[in-house]
Image: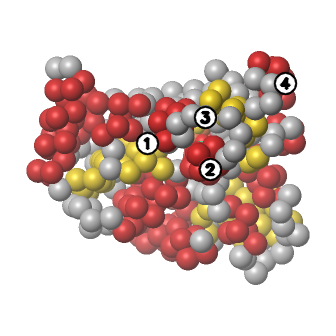
């Protein structure tokens, strides 16, 4: 079946199944094109909590689908690529949080949404790249243990008087971006603004013009007056950026910034998942309940 044929079938089956398709900004173009909503982690969490429909097809990685399942227990949440994980989310465990709490009894535990449901269940509150500073500053504690992304933790530390203790996790895609990449991209595109994701290393953030979540970058480019932008995040974002922001030139900061897990979803898997309503993502009740508290606290902040 060619792309057009499969797209027609997906659209028809979506109606039949009363499903909504959510896609992260890093998804492949054809997947974005059939989605009902494309966004960053925060926007997709909000959508999962509020949109109608009995089924959510989540085109992204597993922690995003888990978050949707936690927020919408009455809906069936499907992750078309069953093995689309986020390596950073595996860099901290629930057991490690429990022992860290004993070492830092006065600290609030803030879990980046890129964590497992078990880790969220052990945390006081969640955050995403879009609201991390706001979430940390909303807490009464003077000390915050921030898991698992050390780079986002250090970025947040720039905007708070609280002591932010970083966990030693990182994104294998953003952590690879270097200052030399920025220098070379600027040489290739003189005058272009440099936008980076807060999962980048501190020294990369120091030489960037702006730091945003993925949707924050898209808004900045669409609303900006500059003609050219260098984009320091996963390259999948460029598809939506070029489509939504006509007349602007956008260049990847690094061609190596590819999240293979985000590329596992394709139209055939999406179609098959709608047909079979599988693979379904579920979170056991007691864990879901505690994880939901941490996510809902975050949603109440922003
Ligand atoms: P955003 O929430 O900014 O979309 O980031 C998600 C992510 O996984 C970045 O690597
Ligand atoms: Fe995880 Fe990094 Fe991929 Fe985002 S880009 S899903 S943080 S591995």
**Where's the C terminus, which quadrant?**
bottom right
| Visible residue check, residue 25 | yes
Q: Is mark 1 within 8 Å of ligand 2?
A: yes
Which tag, 3 or 4, sits closer to the chain's start? 4
Q: How far apart in space, not on screen, are marks 4 and 1 (Cα)? A: 31 Å
Q: Nearer the viewer, mark 2 or mark 1?
A: 2
Q: Is residue 111 left or right of residue 59?
A: right
Q: How far apart in space, not on screen, are marks 3 and 4 (Cα)? A: 21 Å
Given contact means CB atoms under 8 Å apart, are the residues at marks 2 and 1 in contact? no
Q: Nearer the viewer, mark 3 or mark 4?
A: 3
Q: Residue at horizontal 38%, vertical 51%?
A: 37
SS assignment at label 4? helix
Given contact means CB atoms under 8 Å apart, are the residues at marks 1 and 3 in contact? no
Tell me, for residue 281, which label it has, or none.
Answer: none
Tell me, for residue 183, which label it has, or none.
Answer: 4
Q: Which quadrant of the view contains residue 230? A: top right
Q: Which quadrant of the view contains residue 206? A: top right
Given contact means CB atoms under 8 Å apart, are the residues at marks 4 and 1 in contact? no
The percent coordinates of residue 150 (x first, y second) are: 76, 48
Q: Is residue 231 left or right of residue 243?
A: right
Q: Nearer the viewer, mark 2 or mark 4?
A: 2
Q: How far apart in space, not on screen, are marks 2 and 1 (Cα)? A: 26 Å
The percent coordinates of residue 69 (x first, y second) are: 36, 59
SS assignment at label 1? loop
Which tag, 1 or 3, sits closer to the chain's start? 1
Q: Which residue is mark 1?
A: 60
Q: Residue at horizontal 80%, vertical 25%?
A: 190
Q: How far apart in space, not on screen, are marks 2 and 3 (Cα)? A: 10 Å
Q: Which residue is mark 3?
A: 248
Q: Which residue is mark 2?
A: 223
- The figure's colour scheme reads secondary structure
């Amino acid at each position: 079946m060619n792309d057009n044929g499969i797209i027609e079938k997906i659209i028809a089956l979506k109606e039949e199944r009363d499903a909504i398709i959510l896609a992260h900004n890093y998804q492949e173009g054809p997947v974005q094109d059939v989605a009902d909503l494309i966004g960053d982690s925060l926007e997709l969490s909000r959508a999962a909590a509020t949109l109608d429909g009995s089924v959510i097809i989540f085109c992204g990685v597993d922690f995003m689908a888990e978050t949707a399942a936690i927020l919408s227990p009455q809906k069936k949440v499907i992750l078309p690529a069953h093995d689309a994980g986020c390596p950073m989310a595996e860099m901290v465990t629930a057991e490690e949080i429990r022992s860290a709490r004993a070492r830092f009894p006065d600290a609030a535990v803030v879990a980046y949404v890129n964590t497992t449901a078990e880790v969220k269940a052990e945390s006081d509150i969640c955050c995403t790249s879009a609201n991390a500073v706001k979430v940390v500053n909303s807490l009464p504690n003077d000390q915050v243990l921030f898991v698992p992304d050390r780079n986002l933790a250090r970025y947040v530390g720039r905007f708070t008087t609280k002591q932010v203790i970083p966990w030693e996790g990182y994104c294998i895609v953003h952590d690879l971006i270097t200052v030399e990449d920025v220098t070379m991209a600027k040489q290739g595109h003189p005058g272009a603004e440099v936008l980076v994701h807060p999962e980048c290393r501190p020294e990369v953030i120091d030489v960037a013009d702006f730091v945003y979540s993925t949707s924050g970058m898209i808004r900045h480019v669409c609303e900006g007056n500059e003609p050219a932008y260098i984009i320091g995040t996963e390259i999948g974002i460029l598809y939506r950026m070029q489509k939504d922001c006509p007349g602007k030139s956008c260049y990847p900061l690094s061609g190596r910034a590819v999240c293979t897990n985000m590329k596992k979803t394709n139209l055939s898997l999406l179609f098959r998942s709608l047909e079979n309503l599988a693979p379904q993502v579920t979170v056991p009740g007691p864990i879901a309940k505690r994880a939901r508290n941490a996510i809902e606290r975050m949603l109440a902040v922003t």
